[in-house]
Amino acid sequence: MMVDAGSMRIMEILSNATNVIAEGEVLQLLNMHDPDVTIERYLQVIRYKTAKLFEASAQLGAVLAGADAAMEEAAAEYGRRIGTAFQLVDDMLDYTASAEQMGKNAGDDLREGKPTLPLLHLLEHGTAEQRALAREAIVQGGTEHFDAVFSAIHASGALEVTFEAARREAEAAEKAAQQFPPSELKDTLVALCEFSLQRQS
């Protein structure tokens, strides 16, 4: 499909996205079971994986539509921001939603020893006991401290912090979408941002 489009620009965008996403996968593996991961390193993984995939997808739409450079960049920004918001909400739902709501089991990130923003916030702002619990959970993975970590995350305000981070990204995506010419499709993209701003817990 990439070759059939007959566009070097499409080839360039997709080849770059493939490289960045592969690098993001390696970075995520390096972060696993590491309680010293910083929020910036966590966000870098999101930018390199989920956000890059969304960015490339949105940018390709602009290229295929023959949009100018400004619209192409607006589309890329939209995808990058909405992709980041999507991943932040997904990480928040891992500590709030049921398997039926998510399509996967709650707590999967914790079981895998994956430090996401709710857990990183607890590591920075929890009590000494909560921080020790979070570190042990990240290092060990599994479900031994599942309930205790869940309770600590809810009590620490980590979910609110994560939601606010997602909200800022969704607002930035909406701002980018406002640069598109009026159409039903633009309205749909804006509506997606507004839906993302609704509290999902």
Image (cartoon, rainbow, N blue to C red):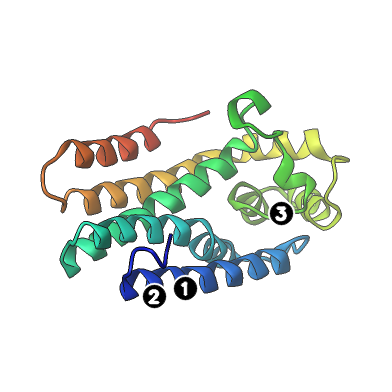
The residue sitting at 63% across, 52% down in the picture is 116
**Residue 18, image x and y in percent?**
52, 69
Q: Please report whichever mark, 3 or 1, sits nearer to the chain's N-terminal start.
A: 1
**Residue 198, image x and y in percent?**
39, 31
Measure how far apart labels 2 and 3 are at the Cα level: 32 Å
Q: Give the residue at mark 3.
A: 114
Examine the image and state in which quarter residue 59 appears: bottom left
Measure how far apart labels 3 and 1 are at the Cα level: 28 Å
Amino acid beneath label 2: Glu
Amino acid beneath label 1: Ser
Q: Give the residue at mark 2.
A: 12
Examine the image and state in which quarter residue 100 appears: top right
Q: Please report whichever mark, 2 or 3, sits nearer to the chain's N-terminal start.
A: 2
Measure how far apart labels 2 and 1 are at the Cα level: 5 Å
Location of residue 22 with respect to 185 vertically, above or below: below
For residue 87, side relative to residue 121 (left or right):
left
Q: Secondary structure at mark 3?
A: loop
Give the total number of marks visible in the rendering: 3
For residue 141, side relative to residue 1 (left or right):
right
Whether residue 136 is visible to the viewer of this picture, yes or no, is yes
The residue sitting at 58% across, 62% down in the picture is 42
The residue sitting at 79% across, 33% down in the picture is 147
Q: Which mark is residue 15?
A: 1
